Image (spheres, grey):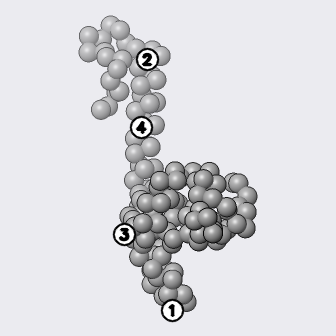
Amino acid sequence: MQEIPEIVNSIKQAAEITGLSEDTIRYYERIGLLPYAERKANGHRHYTKYQIQGILFILRLKATGMTIEEMKRYLELSEQGITALPQRYSLLEAHHDHIGREIAKLQETQKIIEYKLKNFRKLTEAPNLSDPNCDPYRTLEQ
């Protein structure tokens, strides 16, 4: 992971660090998913290390399927400080449980695909060509 400087001096640099486009950063600011960046005298944005870390955290939540509304709610709670800690905990705990269920589904699907691949390899490596029903493109048990 790239080292994040204490101050990121432009939206372009923030985009490079986070992997987002400049337009996406602007959009996230507009919808309240990110706080508006501080502006230099010339009007250009600059970001603190903390803000960039926040963007990266949001990206991780997004990658796990958290909705924009849920992310915004989490950020609103974060701004309330320690008094909203139980609500933030609950929100992240529920999302953690959701991710666990999704991982379990993916692992089950992966097992099924592995089974199909194993059987497909058997058919393609040694098909019984004398069997009129032999179709090397079907697995043994569909």
Q: Amino acid at mark 3?
A: Glu
Res 18 quadrant in image: bottom right
Q: Amino acid at mark 4?
A: Ile
Seen at 67% across and 68% down, the residue is 49
Q: Amino acid at mark 1?
A: Thr
Asked if the residues shown at circle 4 and circle 3 are in contact, with their CB atoms under 8 angstroms apart, the answer is: no
Q: Amino acid at mark 2?
A: Thr
Residue under numbered circle 1? 83
Q: Which numbered disc flags the more N-terminal residue, 1 or 3?
A: 3
Q: Nearer the viewer, mark 1 or mark 4?
A: 1
Residue under numbered circle 4? 113
Q: Which numbered disc flags the more N-terminal residue, 2 or 4?
A: 4
Seen at 45% across and 15% down, the residue is 126
Residue under numbered circle 3? 69
Q: Is residue 114 left or right of residue 132?
A: right
Q: Say how many tags the image has.
A: 4
Q: Position of residue 11 (x, y in %)?
A: 58, 58
Label 1 CA crowd tier, 10 Å (few <14, some 14–19, many 20+): few
Label 2 CA crowd tier, 10 Å (few <14, some 14–19, many 20+): some
Label 3 CA crowd tier, 10 Å (few <14, some 14–19, many 20+): few
Q: Position of residue 100 (x, y in %)?
A: 46, 62
Q: Which numbered disc flags the more N-terminal residue, 3 or 2?
A: 3
Work out how far the residue at label 2 is from the one at label 4, CA to CA, in angstroms: 16 Å
Q: Nearer the viewer, mark 4 or mark 3?
A: 3
Residue under numbered circle 2? 124
Work out how far the residue at label 3 is from the one at label 2, CA to CA, in angstroms: 49 Å
Q: Secondary structure at mark 3?
A: helix
Work out how far the residue at label 1 is from the one at label 4, CA to CA, in angstroms: 47 Å
Seen at 70% across and 66% down, the residue is 7
Q: Which numbered disc flags the more N-terminal residue, 1 or 2?
A: 1
- The one nearer the camera, 130 or 106, is 106
Work out how far the residue at label 4 is from the one at label 3, CA to CA, in angstroms: 34 Å
